[in-house]
Image: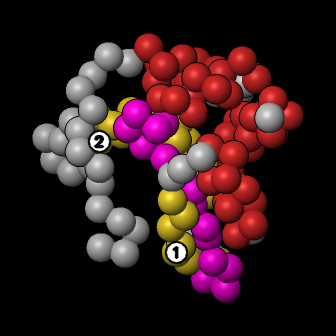
């Protein structure tokens, strides 16, 4: 499992967003890890290793011919994932540490990708 976690830490470091994201005006911050990929299998593997999250599909902003598959994991699930991949992280080490040490209130889950 540690090899897979190290692989995921590398994907997060190279392609991912890690941070406390607000959704909407005056919204509370939510611990978030997202990875956008044009390869659906890579996104599915991220979800499998993380043990949760979801895959949202949308058009790639700069090239409408490619579909973008974004793996998203939030709230306590993002905190747990950050704890698991932090020892393997180099590029996003500081951002993952902020999520792990974040002491805010966990809001209810967000709506699905479809609505």
* Residue beneath disc 1: 58
- Which residue shows up at 29% across the image and 54% down it? 110
- Residue 74: in magenta span: yes
Q: Quadrant of the N terminus?
A: top right
- Label 2: how many residues lie within 10 Å, few (<14), some (14-19) or many (20+)? few
Query: In the image, 19: left or right of 6?
Result: left
Along the line of sight, which residue is nearer the eye, 65 or 36? 36
- Which residue shows up at 52% across the image and 41% down it? 33
Q: Position of residue 16 (x, y in %)?
A: 62, 44
Figure quadrant of residue 39: bottom right
* Residue beneath disc 2: 22
Along the line of sight, which residue is nearer the eye, 88 or 93? 88
Query: In the image, 41: left or right of 70?
Result: right
Above or below, 41 relative to 63:
above
Figure quadrant of residue 41: bottom right
Q: Position of residue 81 (x, y in %)?
A: 57, 33
Circle 2 sits in a helix, a strand or a loop, which is it?
Answer: strand
The overriding secondary structure of the stretch rendered in magenta is strand
Figure quadrant of residue 61: bottom right
Residue 24, disc: none
- Residue 90: in magenta span: no
Numbered label tally: 2
**In the image, which residues are magenta?**
64-78
Looking at marks 2 and 1 on the same chain, the residue that comes earlier in the sequence is marked by 2
- Which residue shows up at 29% across the image and 42% down it? 22
Q: Position of residue 20 (x, y in %)?
A: 39, 33
Above or below, 104 relative to 12:
above
Can you name the residue that lies furthest to the left here? 26
Can you name the residue that lies furthest to the bottom here? 65
Circle 1 sits in a helix, a strand or a loop, which is it?
Answer: strand
């Amino acid at each position: 499992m540690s090899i897979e976690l190290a692989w995921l830490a590398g994907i997060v470091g190279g392609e991912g967003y890690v941070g406390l994201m607000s959704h909407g005006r005056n919204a509370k911050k939510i611990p978030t890890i997202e990875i956008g990929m044009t390869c659906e299998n890579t996104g599915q593997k991220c979800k499998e290793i993380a043990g949760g999250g979801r895959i949202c599909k949308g058009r790639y902003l700069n090239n409408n011919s490619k579909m973008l598959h974004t793996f998203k994991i939030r709230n306590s699930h993002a905190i747990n994932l950050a704890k698991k991949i932090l020892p393997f992280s180099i590029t996003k080490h500081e951002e993952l540490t902020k999520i792990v040490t974040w002491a805010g209130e966990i809001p209810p889950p967000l709506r699905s990708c479809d609505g």
